[in-house]
Amino acid sequence: MNLWQGQKQAYKEAINYMLKRKSGEETSIITPWPKFNDAGINGIEWNNLIVIGARPGSGKTLLKDQIIRESFNLNPNEDFRVLEFNFEMLPKTSAIRQFSSITGKTYKELLSANSKISDNVIKYCSEYAKQRIQLPIDTIYKSVTISEFKNQIDRYMEYHKGKKTIITLDHTLLIKKDAKHGNNFMPMLFELGEAFTHIKRTYPCTIIALSQLNRNVDNPDRAVDGKYGNYILTSDIFGSDAMLQHADMLIGMNRPAQQKIKFYGPQRYIIKDDRTLVFHFLKVRNGDPRMSFFKAVFEKMEIHEMETPDTQV
């Protein structure tokens, strides 16, 4: 079977997509943050792979959860589902984190760690749950291999007749390795990257995958104030060689205060507290790479935009 084709089909599909974008028939997934939307094409395009790399505790799960949590309200004209692969967090933990967001109560407060939570708060959470369970969100909590990952998505898309779906993976290192991979993660990550590309080209979906950073990001010289090494670089993303070529958007998240950095990068941005997050948009295939600042509101399990900090004179 011949695999090649002429340019006619590509141009036809391109013009058709442009016309649909112009008419509003095709749109991107709008996120809660104008800065994030502006980095892409008015949000996240469908048939894209978004890879988010960060240290533990830097807010990458908050970012993913907030995109999903607010996606239905922000994209009311889109008919889509969500399929989450969550191998790290218990279902009840994930739900309590959502309750934290809508009540403004911390996780500890909701679990009556210091004083008993009120019946009114529990009632409010119950009413929220009744509304949320009506949304088309499904989760797979059992760890799977790459072949099982692909198989579950194939079955899901067939069951739901190919409806648009946001697929999330939290996170890449928790995919089970086949025996053929041995103790080496890299072959597994290359295969996972190929699976991502196959899935996004086969189905009307977008994939959000979370990843760790390489250990060298914690070298002491990278925590020296005012150095380029403060920044998250493409090479810092674990398995960057595998993920970079497949990702349409690659984001490195940083929380400078974790490394006691007070003046961030060569421009010496002033980091006032441990809530400041820096998003390094390292690769944006169809948008604009950039660096943007955000603020983590951990007690509400949310991320907010913030102004670019002042620089040290």
Image (spheres, rainbow, N blue to C red):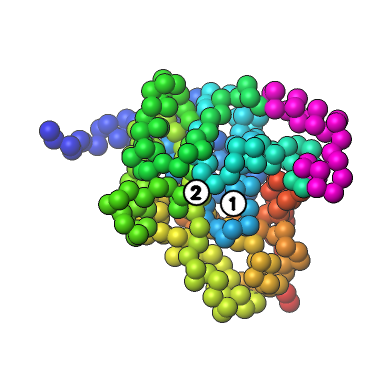
Q: Relative to 30, does residue 50 appear above or below in the rendering?
A: below
Task: Specify the quadrant of the image occupied by residue 311.
Answer: bottom right
Closer-to-camera residue (57/74): 57
Evaluate whether residue 281 shows in this view. yes
**Around disc 2, counting alpha carbons within 10 Å, would you say few (fewer than 14), some (14 to 19), or many (20 or more)?**
many
Q: Is residue 226 left or right of residue 175?
A: right
Q: Secondary structure at mark 1?
A: helix
**For the residues bearing labels 1 and 2, Cβ distance under 8 angstroms:** yes
Task: Specify the quadrant of the image occupied by residue 126.
Answer: top right
Closer-to-camera residue (215/194): 215
**On residue 60, which mark appears?**
1
Residue marked by disc 2: 171
Magenta segment: 109-131
Q: Where does the image place residue 192, in percent across and percent down from the top left?
A: 36, 47
Specify whether residue 124 is painted magenta.
Answer: yes
Specify whether residue 73 is painted magenta.
Answer: no
**CA distance separating discs 1 and 2:** 10 Å
Main secondary structure type of the part rendered in magenta: helix
Q: Which residue occupies 36% across, 50% down?
A: 177
Closer-to-camera residue (87/297): 87
If the image is split into quadrants, where does the C terminus sit? Answer: bottom right
Question: Nearer the viewer's eye, disc 1 or disc 2?
Answer: 2
Amino acid type shown at disc 2: His
Q: Is residue 225 left or right of residue 234?
A: right
Evaluate whether residue 38 shows in this view. no
